[in-house]
Amino acid sequence: MKIGFIGLGNMGAAMAANLLKAGHEVTAYNRSPDKVTALAAQGARPAASVADACRGDVVVTMLANDDAVQAVTFGDDGILASLPEGAIHVSSSTVSTALTERLTEAHATAGQGFVAAPVFGRPEAAAAAKLFVVTAGAPAAVDKVSPIFDAIGQRTFVLGEEPQAANLVKISGNFLIASVIESLGEAMALVSKAGVDKQQYLELLTSTLFDAPVYRTYGGLLAREEFTPAGFAATLGLKDVKLALSAGEELQVPLPVASLLRDRFLTLLATGAPSWTGRRWVRSARGRPERTTPPRNASAPRIAATW
């Protein structure tokens, strides 16, 4: 299959590499050309523009937010203007349900297909082709692009014909992950302040009622205090929680925990703390307060884990 791939971040680069390994022809575009160069060394064809990445059967986007996806889709010489009739746009980005609905309508009007296919998994899962793909769209379109999902993931969940359903499930999953990290951070701060070993505490949790990957993975990061290198910008964490709140408002579903998490992220960004994955609670439990003033020229804080 001839596939264009737009967005070579921590997740996208690994996904595109696995498409190459599966024998697909990949044309790659990224704003930072060095990432394209690295993928070209593995056999990808560099694209000089978004339009250049839209010459094949499918184009996959893996971008940070609504603004980025809108820019490459609706901009001059973007996906909508460049993708051939009958070709399919697969969006693996975590974006709003409102944008997903807009993309679905716009591509249908242009005679193109659109499939939402966000993924669950950290960068190491992406590198190992062990992602979980959550997809929705017209059955014929989903079937056509299923070899892509087979190449990047260990299992695909098809949620029906409305692409926004896949994005809503992804948003809800990221909200749950953030909730787990928040509660784990607080619980570990509580027990470690009393002298309980965090690693022993985690073993107890994951050997009894909390034997799930999200507790093992993020609990391990918290217990070992592995906050660097960070793998996820706090601004993106805030974005995901705000997407959940926006969906809740649209559907008239109150999400009080999401409101708390939004305030946590805003506090993090306001104080310039370098990571969110439990550092504040672990440090406070040991009597070491976090920085309260952002360092000069500080870059966006990053979470030491990716959803």
Image (spheres, helix red, strand yellow):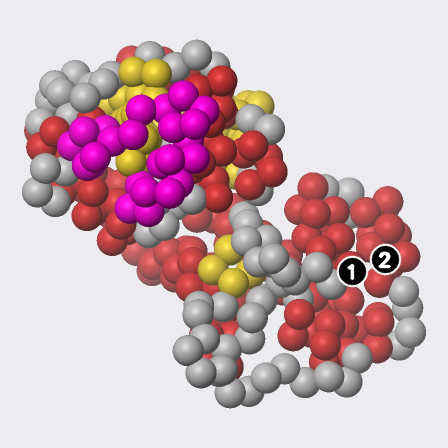
Q: Is residue 197 above or below residue 219?
A: below
At horizontal 59% and vertical 35% (from top left) the residue drawn is: 125
Under mark 2, the amino acid is Gln
Q: Which residue is mark 1?
A: 223
Residue 233's x, y, as percent? 47, 60
In the drawing, what numbered circle is on residue 199? 2
Under mark 1, the amino acid is Ala
Magenta run includes residue 219: no
Asked if the residues shown at circle 1 and circle 2 are in contact, with their CB atoms under 8 angstroms apart, the answer is yes
Image side of residue 89 versus residue 63, left or right: left
At horizontal 37% and vertical 56% (from top left) the residue drawn is: 243
Image side of residue 45 versus residue 49, left or right: right
Magenta run includes residue 34: yes
Q: Is residue 54 above or below residue 263?
A: above
Number of callouts in the render? Answer: 2
At horizontal 61% and vertical 57% (from top left) the residue drawn is: 229
Image side of residue 240 versus residue 71, left or right: right
Provide the residue span drawn in magenta. Answer: 30-53
